[in-house]
Image (cartoon, helix red, strand yellow):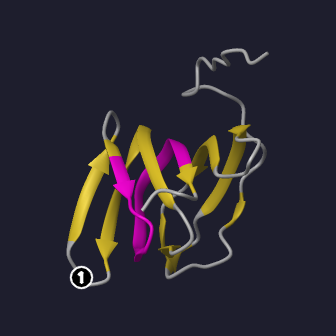
Amino acid sequence: MKFVQTFASLADIELPAKTPKPTVLEGSPAEASVTLWTAVDGTMRIGVWECTPGRFPSNREAASETCYILKGRVRLTNEDGSSKEVGAGEMLVLPRGWKGEWAILEETRKIFVIHNDAV
């Protein structure tokens, strides 16, 4: 039998200690995350991530990512140089194949859904 799983207070959920991002373009961003749920078949993972200001590359070749920003502000820059700022209360989708940069403008916390099958 399968049951519904619920998660509350994600803006305040305790995360492990932040560690430095392994790839950095500017600043010294540090991050922490917790996985809340993983699909049995491994095709989807949901969690909470937080990061301090800085800039780093991102590559979504293997999976798409949907994010809901709980707090903070980021700038996402596409490979072609175009960019978009996103802040608390907004959602973004990085389709599989997206490459670009994240610039964390203010300490940011997001809910993420990584989906390996979505194109």
Q: Which residues are magenta?
A: 92-113
Rendered residue at 55%/53% (across/down)? 115
**Viewer-side residue, 28 vs 51:** 51
Q: Residues within 10 Å of mark 1 (few under 14, many from 20)?
A: few
Rendered residue at 72%/15% (across/down)? 3
Mark 1: amino acid: Gly
The tally of labels here is 1
Above or below, 109 against 43 in this view is: above
SS at mark 1 in the image = loop
Q: Which residue is mark 1?
A: 81
Above or below, 31 against 108 in this view is: below
**Viewer-side residue, 52 vs 49:** 49
Question: Residue 71: which quarter of the image?
Answer: top left
**Left or right placement of residue 72 versus residue 19 in this view:** left
Quadrant containing the C terminus in the rendered view: bottom left
Quadrant containing the N terminus in the rendered view: top right
**Viewer-side residue, 117 vs 55:** 117
Question: Residue 20: which quarter of the image?
Answer: bottom right
Rendered residue at 68%/19% (across/down)? 5
**Viewer-side residue, 43 vs 30:** 43
**Left or right placement of residue 108 versus residue 94 in this view:** right
